Image: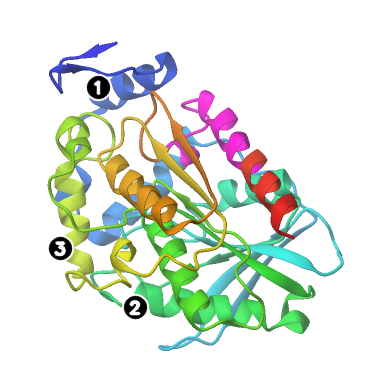
Amino acid sequence: MADSKTGGAHFVRPDVRMFLDFLATTGGLAMSQMSAADARQAYVMMGTVAELPPCDLAVIKDLTCPGPAGDIPLRLYDARETRGPGPAVVFYHGGGFVIGDLESHHALCTEIAAGLDLPVIAVDYRLAPEHPFPAAPDDCEAASRWIAGSPAALGREITGLIPMGDSAGGNLAIVITQALTEKPAAAPVVLQVPIYPLSDDKPDHQSFHDFGEGFLLTADTMNWFSDAYSAVPGDIRAYPLYGDHAATPPTILVTAGLDPIRDSGRVYGAELIRAGAEVVFLEMKGTIHGFVQVRKAIPSAQADLHSIFAAVKLLLERTT
């Protein structure tokens, strides 16, 4: 399907096109023109319109763990009231390191817990600009180490960690995997699942040019996020492409075909393959950045999410 905004031909799914057309008619301020507080509220409100309702689970429990700047809020999800020892998903939400929290990704986390039949622990890390880099990875690493070694608090013995996240959370999943591979926690990382992650600071990927306008995540918003986060150029805790990939655990890497940061995910996948890591690469054609959070507005995204679950189950069978 041709798209006049990019001047080229890019396949756009019909339900994605309907959602993008709807967004184009709503008007209002761009996120980059809002205050951080207003943008956070708008992000949560979008979910009430565009996201499926949460799944019913046996356990949804708010917790805290110690962090470098005070307690870090967490939320435990589990389809089972009790379970034996096994792996758990540690989930880091997206939102450009500026927006997002436990509520913005609540429905998604319930779907992950139900679809994988694994405990999911979501991490509510500190946000920029109030807390710029490296506050987010500092919090996420501290929380992940605590999760690995706190069976009494969780009511579950965690034998392996599965860092997982979308967008900024996908970046954090890679960063934390690298940190816990270099200096292991009480339970090892057995798998990582970065979903449309930012991996590098390269400013001229072709996908930036092709999809920086008209596909939900815009170039202006990305620049706004970047300015707020204030990451150190080339720092592997901000741009994990530049880290060591030799010991990377099995990975499910997900990109979206119409995403401005698609190519940042692709180049990360290429580095993993060069390093000999086991990788399942899933590029969801014809859809946009953020698809896992707009599954009511884009019904095909539910099938995409369950394809990710199938890949997680496949690699878990091979590695555990």
Amino acid, disc 3? Asp
Residue 109's place in the image compared with 2, above or below, is below
- The answer to the question of whether label 1 and label 3 lie on touching residues, with beta carbons closer than 8 A, is no
Give the class, few, some or many, for how many residues have Cα within 10 Å of label 2's Cα (few <14, many ≥20): some
Q: Distance between the residues labelled 1 and 2?
A: 37 Å
Asked whether 45 or 210 is in front, the reply is: 210
Could you tell me residue 28's position as x and y percent?
Answer: 20, 36
Distance, label 2 to label 3, CA atoms, is 15 Å
| SS assignment for the magenta stretch, majority | helix
Front position among marks 1 and 2: 2
Q: Verify whether residue 307 appears in magenta.
A: yes
For mark 1, does the 10 Å Cα neighbourhood hold few (<14), some (14 to 19), or many (20 or more) residues? few
Q: Residue at x 48, y 86 (%)?
A: 67
Q: Is residue 125 above or below residue 303?
A: below
> N-terminal of the two: label 2 or label 3?
2
Where does the C terminus fall, quadrant-wise?
bottom right
Whichever of callouts 1 and 2 sits on the residue coming sooner in the sequence is: 1
